[in-house]
């Protein structure tokens, strides 16, 4: 295979001052993707009231999730072939075009289509951001900067609901998409000026068949999760056909990748124990973590009666938890060059936090909920970046983008499955507890338990019974998350540890 090395060919890491400049641009790109996950939900009721299409509401979220998850492995591979900076900026550009068009949507169909385009760019933002970090910072020093990543996720989780409520009640819901444009422009400018990454041009053959199969397979699976839990039912013929399509395409993808000259996801990477174990941990962690991130705000709004804005502020303890432990674990990783203890500690803390959250009641004081939320965030802070660093440290630099995007892909798949499963748990258990509270007979006038605002206006004692049922159902959601975290803890015990590479060393692929 012929290789041509561009001007920036040496695999030197950047000095600290330049790293900080690059991080500002990369963090802005990460913020685009992280903010999108929390800002849109607040505005959905207003969007539907203006554009119509209540029956298609879920597709505003699903369309983005579908294209972003399916495209994640493709972005990593393409960046390995063509260079990180150009591909990262391309992803930002696609995301910004989708955002601008989404804000101009005149009907629900247009919004869904433009959200799909936005998701296509969003699939590359997070994975490529972490890949760039792997390019410019040696593994041993990467922990020093973990606090910045934790800050991005923390700020987005709080700022998302706040900005969503502000724009929806103020200048209009369209600004939840247009706010992305100045953030993205900043990222483009900074990465253009400061981001200098070694780029290797080589003869290559793009794996179009593998790309098509993985997109089709992931689409089948996410459509199964979206439709089976609601419209079709988990065992309906249409739902099972989608599931069978996913299984068949997954098997076909493995066969295609084994024969491809330049596979999207090289199967040889799975022979690397750190890559395999790390991604298993990411998948299980993604399954569990979204139970707290999604359903804790539901408890605060439905049971505690908080507004979306107030519930966002009430989650600040979780943000502090992420921030504090990501900084602590990062500094210790830099000092010692070791990482295995942190996913183990993080999974253990998450187990405790989810168990405590499963004990909350209608009248639980906020200070207790805040402590539990802090512990939940602390568990995430120990795990969010440490496993990615371990995976990056264990593969060749030529596979950096592919390995990093794979880590993001498996976490996203876990999150998609976890969201669907936990949503089904909430729905089924809420039905059970409502029947239990009212002796199997619905009260006069009926109950719209899916309308959080309506719950707060129910008459007594109906409201009290509904709040008890809602709280017990959410408790069961947290309990249902425990087995996945326990499995993640078990997997973390098998994570092989090799010393993190320094500036004078190159990561060496391991088996």
Image (cartoon, rainbow, N blue to C red):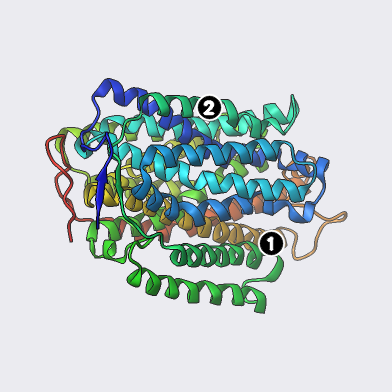
Task: Determine crowd level at label 2: few under 14, some 14-19, many 20+ residues with C-alpha closer than 10 A.
Answer: some
Which element is circle 1 on? helix
Badge nearest the viewer, 2 or 1:
2
Q: Quadrant of residue 421?
A: bottom right
Q: Is residue 74 visible?
A: yes
Q: Is residue 455 left or right of residue 99?
A: right
- Residue at image x 72%, y 44%? 452
- Check the image and name the residue furthest to the bottom: 237
In the picture of the structure, the residue carrying the numbered disc 2 is 185
Q: Is residue 361 left or right of residue 402?
A: right
- Residue at image x 22%, y 36%? 138
> Where 413 sits versus 328, above or below?
below
Q: Which of 57 and 297 is in front in this view?
A: 57
**Earlier residue among tags 2 and 1:** 2
In the picture of the structure, the residue carrying the numbered disc 1 is 431
Q: Position of residue 445 (x, y in %)?
A: 87, 54
């Amino acid at each position: 295979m012929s290789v041509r090395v561009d001007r920036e060919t040496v695999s030197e890491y950047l000095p600290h001052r330049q790293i900080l400049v690059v991080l500002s641009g990369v963090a802005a790109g990460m913020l685009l993707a992280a903010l999108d996950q929390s800002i849109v939900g607040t505005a959905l009721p207003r969007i539907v009231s203006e554009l119509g299409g209540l029956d298609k509401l879920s597709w505003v979220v699903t369309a983005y999730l579908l294209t972003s998850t399916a495209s994640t492995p493709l972005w990593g591979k393409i960046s390995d072939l063509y260079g990180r900076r150009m591909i990262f900026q391309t992803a930002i550009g696609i995301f910004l075009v989708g955002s601008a068009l989404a804000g101009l949507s005149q009907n629900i169909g247009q919004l869904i289509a433009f959200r799909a385009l936005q998701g296509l760019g969003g699939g590359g933002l997070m994975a490529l951001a972490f890949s760039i970090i792997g390019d410019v910072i040696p593994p041993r020093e990467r922990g020093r900067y973990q606090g910045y990543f934790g800050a991005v996720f923390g700020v987005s989780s709080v700022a998302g609901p706040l900005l969503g409520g502000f724009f929806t009640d103020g200048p209009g819901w369209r600004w939840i998409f247009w706010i992305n444009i100045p953030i993205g422009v900043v990222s483009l400018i900074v990465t253009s000026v400061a981001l200098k990454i070694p780029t290797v041009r080589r003869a290559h053959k793009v794996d179009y068949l593998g790309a098509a199969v993985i997109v089709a397979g992931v689409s089948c699976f996410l459509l199964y999760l979206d439709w089976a839990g609601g419209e079709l039912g988990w065992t309906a013929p249409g739902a099972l056909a989608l599931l069978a399509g996913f299984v068949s395409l997954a098997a076909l993808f493995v066969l295609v990748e084994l024969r491809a000259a330049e596979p999207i996801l090289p199967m040889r990477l799975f022979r690397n124990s750190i890559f395999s174990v790390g991604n298993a941990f990411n998948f299980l962690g993604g399954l569990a973590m979204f139970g707290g991130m999604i359903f804790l705000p539901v408890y605060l709004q439905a049971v505690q009666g908080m507004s979306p804005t107030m519930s966002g502020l009430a989650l600040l303890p979780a943000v502090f938890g992420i921030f504090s432990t990501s900084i602590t674990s990062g500094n210790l990783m830099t000092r010692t060059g070791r990482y295995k203890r942190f996913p183990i500690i993080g999974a253990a803390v998450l187990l405790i936090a989810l168990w405590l959250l499963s004990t909350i009641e209608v009248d639980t004081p906020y200070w207790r909920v805040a402590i539990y939320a802090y512990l939940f965030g602390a568990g995430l802070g120990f795990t969010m970046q440490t496993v990615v660093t371990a995976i990056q440290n264990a593969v060749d630099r030529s596979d950096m983008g592919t390995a990093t995007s794979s880590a993001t892909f498996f976490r996203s798949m876990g999150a998609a499955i976890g969201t669907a499963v936990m949503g089904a748990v909430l729905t089924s258990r809420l039905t059970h507890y409502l029947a239990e509270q009212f002796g199997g007979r619905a009260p006069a006038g009926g109950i719209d338990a899916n309308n959080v605002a309506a719950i707060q206006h129910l008459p007594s004692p109906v409201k009290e019974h509904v709040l008890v049922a809602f709280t017990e159902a959410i408790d069961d959601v947290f309990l249902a998350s425990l087995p996945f975290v326990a499995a993640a803890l078990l997997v973390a015990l098998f994570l092989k540890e090799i010393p993190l590479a320094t500036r004078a060393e190159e990561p060496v692929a391991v088996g």
